[in-house]
Each structure stands twice: as structure tokens, then as C-alpha cells.
Amino acid sequence: MNDLNNYLRMHYHIILTKECNLNCKYCGGGSDSQPKEIQYSISNLKSFLSKDSAPVIEFYGGEPLLRIETMKRIMDAIPGRFVIQTNGLFLDRIEPQYLEKFNAILVSIDGKKNVTDEWRGIGVYERIIENIGIIRQKGFHGYLVARMTVAQGTDIYENVRHLLDTGFFDHVHWQLSFEMFWEGAEDRIEDWICSYNKGISSLVEWWLSEMRKGRYSGIVPFTGIMNSLLSGKDSKLRCGSGIDFFTIMPDGRVSACPVSVDFDFSVVGSIFNDSPFSLCNKVRVGEPCISCDIFHICGGRCLFVNKAQDMLRENGYSLICTTVGHLVGELHNALPRVVKLIEKGTVRRSDFDYPEFNNGCEIIP
Ligand code: SF4
Ligand code: SF4
């Protein structure tokens, strides 16, 4: 077995189906390319993953819980640690013996009821909240992570605060919606980026004020970046795509990133012809990230966007980077105060060790 196996924790998104039971405005149902359903056998998958002694398997879609029986067969057949990214509508269908095998469940929810329902569909927010209650009652003790897609116009401060205030989620993460940066997006977004950045500043101040009261709030981007600032260690691309995070497509090919499966740059091998550790580092972020002043802390943010820059609107890349620079700058300013709070014992250094292993959050929104 390759030496890499000794120190790399490898993650595998498994696309159980490309079908989805929602039609979110910023997504439109995901990838339409064929095949949409798994073509390989579970023994093919098992044979591929058997070359990794500690795989983290993350079910992904489309909506993975549309193929709950396949998911259960994989969980029965393959030893590993399990994570799922779901829209939450069918969470109540997972039986307790499978729920307890999940280290983390990531639920897509965009914030308050009106925001979630506007983008994801009427009634979605309530179904999610109901189902979260059900899985907790059934004995799910792992991490529950709210995954927001932040579309233009979203008030980041209000909506992150709301999700934390529900008390249901251990962590809240968000990604900026791709769609507002693509070529052809109509509205100017500079004003919204400005208000988003202001919201981030307010959220950092609130996060610090909570810490001063001895309360740690699991805001994933803040935690991940602050952890790096505290340790002084440089970061790789934080989502891990192409490094230690891969996606097994329904036809058995392996993509570096779960979102860019239809792009040639992203396909790095297959479960039939390759072993897991031979896939690492075949594709990496390039310029402008490598020459960027904060590359060591940002890590390049997104491989897909880096490789598909020609699809972005004019200034699209620099607009995204404005948000990253602002976020990193605010956390850098907060660093001395965080260090003092750790020294005083108000919060623990270990509060910033999120997570034990990357469970599918990209850290940089
Ligand atoms: S801030 Fe932008 S240019 Fe700099 S590393 Fe991050 S994504 Fe790349
Ligand atoms: S951040 Fe970009 S490269 Fe990473 S998983 Fe998301 S879309 Fe893929």
C-alpha cells in the first residue's frame, strides 16, 4: 500500500444518483449528463476502497436519499466512516442502525424560513426542521451541519445567526452561489458584495462577543481559518478536491470535485483502473492563486472556479477574492483577541480544531 496511506485521510463522495427531488433556483436539479444512476457493482466499489485502510465515504447526489437502499447496501458492505450531504426531505427515512453510523450529516438549508423557501421551495424549511428533530430522537449523535448556499441578496449575518439560534446545528457552513459570478448573470453584484462583507464583519464581532461569554459558536469558515492562523500552518486547497477528496461518478470514473464532474479537467481516473492514492495531486489550482498574497491561508478556494475562469463574468474572480480577502483580514484582526481568550481559558484551543476530519465543508465560502 502506498506510503501516502499513512498520513492522508482520503474522502470519497459517492454520487448515488443525479436525480433530485427539489429544483432549487440556483441549481436547477444538478448535472444532467448520463448515466444518472450507478453502473458499477458494490463489489467494484469495495475492491477500489479496500486499498484505503480508513476511507471516509460521503453520500452525495442529486439527492442521495432517493437511493436509500443502495446507500444502506454500501454501508453494510464497506467499512469506513460515513457522511451524507442531503436536502433533508427524506432524513426521517433513515433507520436508527444507519443513523448511528454517520459521523456527520450535512443538511442544505439557506437560513430563515423565507430565505430557504424562496430558493429551495415552499415548505422545505419546515420539513428540514421536522426531520432534524426526528433523527435526533432516533439517536443520531454525530455532527449536524447546516450547509447554506448564499445567493445574491442574502443577509449573511441574519441567516447564519438564525441557524445557530435554532440550537439544532453543531456547525453552520456556507458557500457563495456560483451562479451570480457566471458570465451572463445580469445584475451587478458589487453592492451586494459590499453588504455581504459588512455582514461578515458583524458576524466576526458577534462570534468574538460570544467567546468572551465562554460560548463557542460553530461557524465553519471562521473556525477553519482561525485554526490555521493559530497554528501558523499553511493550508492546501481546503475542500481537498484532487488532493484527498474525490468523487466517484455513477459510471465509476473519478472526479476531483463533486460539482465539476462534467468537465474534462476534473476526471482523474476510475475505480476500475486506478487505486485511491494514485489519484492524488493530478490536478491542482493554478494562477492567479499561486501568486496571491493570501494563497497560504486561502489555499485557492475552489478548483472548479480556478479551472473554469473563462466562464466567469468580467471581474468575477476578483469579486470572489474580495470576499475571501475581507474574511481573512477580519479574522486576522481578531486573532490577538482570540489568543487572549484561549490564554485566559475562556475558550479552548481545541474549539478551533474543526473538524476531526474534513467532513465536506469547503471552509472558504
Ligand atoms: S484569494 Fe482568490 S486569488 Fe487568492 S488564493 Fe484565494 S481564490 Fe486564489
Ligand atoms: S470548492 Fe470548488 S473545487 Fe472544492 S468541492 Fe466545491 S466546487 Fe469543487
Image (spheres, rainbow, N blue to C red):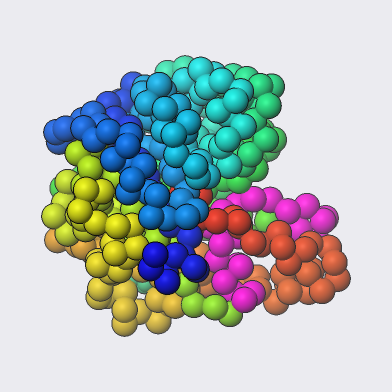
Q: Is residue 319 left or right of residue 150?
A: left
**Tag count in the figure?**
0
State which quarter of the image contains the C terminus: bottom left
Residue 152 location in percent, x, y? 37, 44
State which quarter of the image contains the N terminus: bottom left
Q: Nearer the viewer, residue 313 or 236?
A: 236
Q: Nearer the viewer, residue 314 or 338?
A: 338
Residue 339 location in percent, x, y? 73, 74
Q: Is residue 105 visible?
A: yes
Which residue is pictured at 33% across the width and 45% down the height? 47
Residue 80 location in percent, x, y? 50, 45
Image: 207 above or below 343: above
Q: Is residue 85 visible?
A: no
Question: Range of the magenta residues?
Answer: 209-231
Image: 271 above or below 305: above
Which residue is pictured at 45% across the width and 27% down the height? 72
Is residue 286 highlighted in magenta?
A: no
Residue 126 found in image quarter:
top right
Residue 138 found in image quarter:
top right
Which residue is pictured at 15% across the width and 36% down the height? 33
Residue 259 location in percent, x, y? 28, 46
Q: Nearer the viewer, residue 21 or 119?
A: 21
Give the main secondary structure of the magenta stretch.
helix
Q: Is residue 299 left or right of residue 131?
A: left
Residue 274 found in image quarter:
bottom left
Image: 69 above or below 33: above
Is residue 212 highlighted in magenta?
A: yes
Which residue is pictured at 59% across the width and 55% down the height? 355
Image: 227 above or below 291: above
